[in-house]
Amino acid sequence: MLDRVALRAGRLARLRSEMAAREVAAVLLTDSVNVRCASGARNMQIFTAPNPARYLFVALDGFVMCWWQVICAAGVAVIGVA
């Protein structure tokens, strides 16, 4: 059986390893495929097809933050953070 927790942890570790090798302190991912690969966040391609709406911030030695933008019926942007 696939260990999804270990898979996600391994992907994040690989990203941080590449960041360290290139002396990059943080990255901001905007492509939905890259966000999913680095964080495991899924079921977002349909919602982000017209424009990027979910972002992932990864600090080399710190936290990971995912946030997204949703346009409601009134046209107001609501930002969520996880």
Image: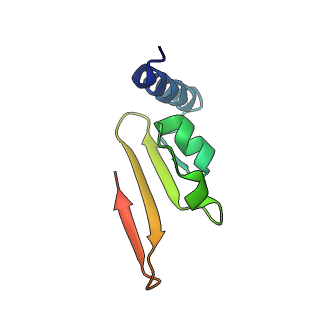
Q: Quadrant of residue 77?
A: bottom left
In percent of width and height, residue 11 lies at 52, 27
Indicate the colouring scheme. Answer: rainbow
Residue at 42% x, 50% y is 66
In percent of width and height, residue 76 lies at 42, 81
Residue 44 in the figure: left or right of residue 63: right
Residue 32 in the figure: left or right of residue 41: right
Residue at 54% x, 41% y is 36
Is 80 located above or below residue 23 in the figure?
below
Residue 68 in the figure: left or right of residue 15: left
Q: Nearer the viewer, residue 3 or 54?
A: 3
Residue 8 in the figure: left or right of residue 34: left
Q: Quadrant of residue 18?
A: top right
Is 46 located above or below residue 62 in the figure?
below
Is 66 located above or below residue 11 in the figure?
below
In percent of width and height, residue 72 lies at 44, 77
In percent of width and height, residue 35 lies at 54, 44
Give the residue at the far front of this rendering.
1
